[in-house]
């Protein structure tokens, strides 16, 4: 069944697809992008429903660190393939109307007070944290509990991952093709891979910390460059990191 949450989440996706610069990484930034496009104030409760629905559709990974706070990763929102996946289900009529009507169509929806009342009564989309982790790992299982990885006990595996992370980073940094394809997001990914190198250099580190930091970028790269060297390197790293779990 199509719900008001589907409407507002689809509006957010179209707003994100029109962002020319870097994607938002916070709820506040996401709210501002939606408000700027449709000239309509979005409440915190509404953006919470949007994020939950984006997660259930696989458009966002939410990374939550006790010190750095929450960070949104919204790479798939720019993917035509991801949007086409929604066309395959019951949302096809809604997508057809939205893509044809554009901004003005959504504005008409938002001007209808019944929409906001129904949205208020709409239950929160169900989130499955474990499913989100598995999705970020390209469908592979990952234990729910955290693990402390000791470098001395896993030296061969950790050193191999280090070398592959460094090689992938070098390839992304030096490739004009990767630069054109990634745009401003290349700097973000390069920074995350360098941060992963720092974690891997430690004598002891938490597996969950490494996983949350680098797995969304690896999955994105594996999809973005599926038929190229970068995609293959990313896939190999995903499997190698999961091997530490």
Image (cartoon, rainbow, N blue to C red):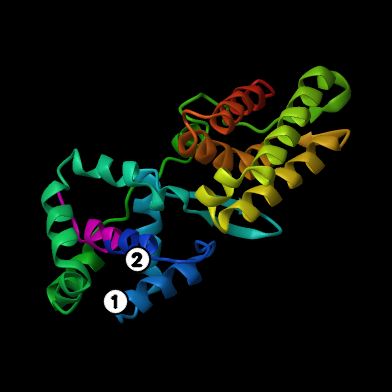
Q: Is residue 35 left or right of residue 95?
A: right
- The part of the image, by quadrant, that contains residue 212 is top right
Seen from the viewer's position, the closer of residues 161 and 21 is 21
Tag count: 2
Report which residue position mark 1 lands on: 38
Q: Name the residue under label 2.
A: 15
Residue 87 screen position, x and y as percent: 20, 43
- Secondary structure mainly formed by the magenta segment: helix
- Is residue 56 visible in the rendered image? The answer is yes
To which quarter of the image does residue 56 belong? top left
Marks 2 and 1: CB-CB under 8 Å? yes
Pick whichever, 63 or 181, lies toward us.
Answer: 181
Residue at 77% over, 28% down: 163
Instruction: State yes or no: residue 207 in magenta.
Output: no
- The residue lying at 64 percent from left, 41 percent from top is 214
Q: Give the range drawn in magenta.
A: 1-10
Residue 2 sits inside the magenta stretch: yes
Q: Residues within 10 Å of mark 1 (few under 14, many from 20)?
A: some
Q: Residue 69 carries which label?
A: none
């Amino acid at each position: 069944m199509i719900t008001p949450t589907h409407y507002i989440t689809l509006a957010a996706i179209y707003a994100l697809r029109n962002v020319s610069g870097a994607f938002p990484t916070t709820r506040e930034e996401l709210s501002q992008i939606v408000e700027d496009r449709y000239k309509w104030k979005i409440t915190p409760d509404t953006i919470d429903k949007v994020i939950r629905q984006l997660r259930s559709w696989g458009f966002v990974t939410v990374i939550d660190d006790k010190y750095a706070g929450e960070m949104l990763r919204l790479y798939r929102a720019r993917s035509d393939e991801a949007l086409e996946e929604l066309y395959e289900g019951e949302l096809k009529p809604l997508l057809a109307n939205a893509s044809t009507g554009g901004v003005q169509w959504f504005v008409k929806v938002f001007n209808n007070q019944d929409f906001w009342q129904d949205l208020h009564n709409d239950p929160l989309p169900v989130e499955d944290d474990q499913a989100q982790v598995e999705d970020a790992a390209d469908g592979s299982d990952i234990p729910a509990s955290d693990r402390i990885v000791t470098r001395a006990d896993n030296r061969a595996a950790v050193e191999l991952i280090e070398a592959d992370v460094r090689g992938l980073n070098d390839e992304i940094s030096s490739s004009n093709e990767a630069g054109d394809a990634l745009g401003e997001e290349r700097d973000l990914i390069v920074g995350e891979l360098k941060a992963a190198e720092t974690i891997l250099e430690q004598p002891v580190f938490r597996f969950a910390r490494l996983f949350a930091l680098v797995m969304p970028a690896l999955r994105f790269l594996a999809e973005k460059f599926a038929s190229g060297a970068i995609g293959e390197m990313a896939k190999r790293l995903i499997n190698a990191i999961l091997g530490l779990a």
